[in-house]
Amino acid sequence: MNQSLRRPALGIAVWLLASGLGALWIARAELALQREAFETDARIAHRLLSQRVLQHEAVMATLALLQPASDGDPPEERLPSVYPQVLGVQRRDRDAAWPDERLRAAEAESRRLRRAVLASLDLPRGRYQLVLGADPASYALQIDMRAMVPWSEWPMKPDSSPTRVTLEHGGQSLVLQPGQGHEGGWRFEFRKHLAASSQPFDLVAVRQLGPGDLPWGRMASWAALVAAIMTALLSWQRQRAKGRRAEELLRLGQVARLNALGELAAGMAHELNQPLTAMLANTQAASRLLDEDPPELATARGAMMQAVEQARRACDVVGRLRRAVQRPDLSAQVQAVALQEAVRNALYLLEPECQRRHVSPALDAVASSLTVLAEPVALEQIIHNLLMNALQALEQVPANERRLALALSRADGRGVLTVSDSGPGIPAELLPRIFEPFFSTRSDGLGLGLSLCETLATSMGGTLSAAPQAPRGVQFRLALPLVPAP
Amino acid sequence: MSTPLSPLIHLIDDDEAVRSSLALLISTVGLRVQTWADPQAFLAGFDRQGIGAIVLDVRMPGISGLTVLDQLVAQGVDQPIIMLTGHGTVEMCRRAFKAGAAEFLEKPVNDEQLLEALQNAVRQHVKSRQRHQADREARERFAQLSEREREVLGLIVAGLTNKEIGRALDLSPRTVETHRANLFAKLGADSLAQLIRRYAALVDADA
């Protein structure tokens, strides 16, 4: 992942894959949800219509039981006012005949099956008759199928619902709800007989979903989210790589400086060793020649001349070295530098070193900012060296006794940084010597760090001093001139 | 002051001042010195047969003293080699001794240290040359012996008497005595003890 995200083509491929899979999952979930809603609606519609047709059976059975009353006023006359779907009721008394042949045939069928049967079904117009043969009178109900639908309880909006609902029987069909058709795409279908055997209509519900029904908005949001996450990841990675690179550069710089110093020392040792070797050999040879009896004065004199020449050669080497490493005058390069900023920067760079030694530096800064006159690189070098010095001193005491405190203050028109450690400290008699070159209390120290710091501080018009710290440790104090108020 | 046969010290250092001063110092004890500025010229031109020693600086331009040391050892040069170095590390010292250096000294070098090391080296070289000379002579004489004489010599070294030797080789004691006189003459031995000291090792190697 680390490497892959950096290559654009691969990054895009990963994004496409993640977006595609996510969108597919979203679409499937949405379709499943739609199907469930569709089936629930269809089941409700089926239940409602089944109740109605069962009601018709019940009404007919009741009529057959009641039979015409002797005082006239037949009960069937009042039916249409109670049930809006009942358009009319016909009665055939025992000796009368049906006006319609179809009704007669239906009654015969009804008597055979001992239940109500359909007659003169006209589904496209939404009309049918229900006939029940009984004694002394038989009845026929004229039903309006559209009025039969209980719209108030209907689970869908008949005008706008995308679902098409029809009643079908024997090749005829009645559209109760037109729905909105799409060609292609996905098709949900529900088909079931109504619950009354006398009116065996099929309730058919169909829902066609096209590409337009997919949740494009959510799918696009998901793709955008994936892109955003990947971009954030990428930039976080870049940021981290940048930080690491900076650290590596810093370390590399330190190593390079040390190497250069080692090379310089080795070169210097060789350059001085040669004349020293010649001087020693010449003087010792001369001494031996003078001891001879008689002394070989001429040869001895020649050897001494040689020794003098070699001493001059050694002087030249030292002079050349001094000129080579002469530092440019820093006082000409000073500029306004925020001391807090420089300290925070150095602390940030040394954070891994602190963590490695279980030291958490405490910084105590004054409220107002201290802007001092300094050469930024030299200042950074001084702070870095003082901190490294303190960290190395703290290595010599147990981890729970390691304290590193930095404080910024203003004194006598100068910005002051103090660095105090709770390390083993420096014996009082050695304290005055710690800024001398090649003086070190560490066995592996070159003794150049503090010497360099002091030289740099002085060349910027500042001072660097050290004092013992109670109860233990050392406090270094760096004072630099403040920028004069405008 | 010195005869042509006196030991010769070869001094190799690229620095003119070091070369001349050390040469002067060495000459004060009566040793002859030949100085070389260029290691390659030294390798190509120095006298391998002469008695003496070699003083070699480790740090030289073009070729390291340690490389020169390796080449000298590989070529079978038997003169002792003293290494000089400006700043010697333990590793460098170890390498030099392992490669066959006789001594490893740090510059600037003290006169007594250097001169003593040189005199030791020369003494050792003379002794080793003498030993080689004796060995070569013994081998040449041994090669002149006949097959039968070698057999007799082997049994003499094993501590057998003439009679026992005659029995072992199926010879008469008189014949054994003749072989014995011949091989003493050929090997130039004056006594039985001298014979055994010089030739026992060769007999063992021959067997």
Image (cartoon, rainbow, N blue to C red):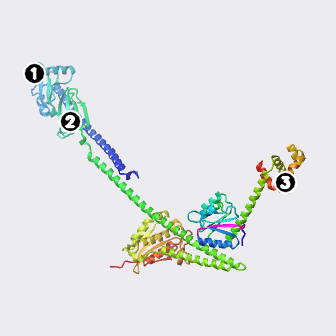
The circle on residue B185 is 3
List the residue tagged with mark 2: A164
In the picture, which quadrant includes the N terminus of chain B?
bottom right
In three-dimensional space, the C-alpha distance between marks 2 and 3, rounded to whole angstroms, equals 138 Å
**Comparing marks 1 and 3, which lies closer to the viewer?**
3
Q: Which range of residues does the magenta coloring cover?
A: B4-14
Residue closer to the observer: A226 or B5: B5
Q: Nearer the viewer, mark 1 or mark 2?
A: 2
Residue at image coords 26%, 47%: A217
Q: Identify the chain of the residue marked 3, using the numbered disc in the image.
A: B
Measured from the top left, where is residue B170 in percent x and y? Answer: 87, 43
Single out the mark in the foreground, 2 or 3: 3
Report whether A235 appears left or right of A157: right
Q: Amino acid at mark 2?
A: Arg
Callout 3, which amino acid?
A: Ala
Are labels 2 and 3 on one chain?
A: no
Which residue was labeled with disc 1?
A99
Q: Is residue A415 above or below residue B54?
A: below
**Disc 1 with disc 2 on a shared chain:** yes
Q: CA distance from mark 1 to mark 3?
A: 171 Å
Q: Secondary structure at mark 3?
A: helix
* SS for callout 2: strand
Looking at the picture, which amino acid does disc 1 mark? Answer: Pro
B63 vs A41, left or right, is right
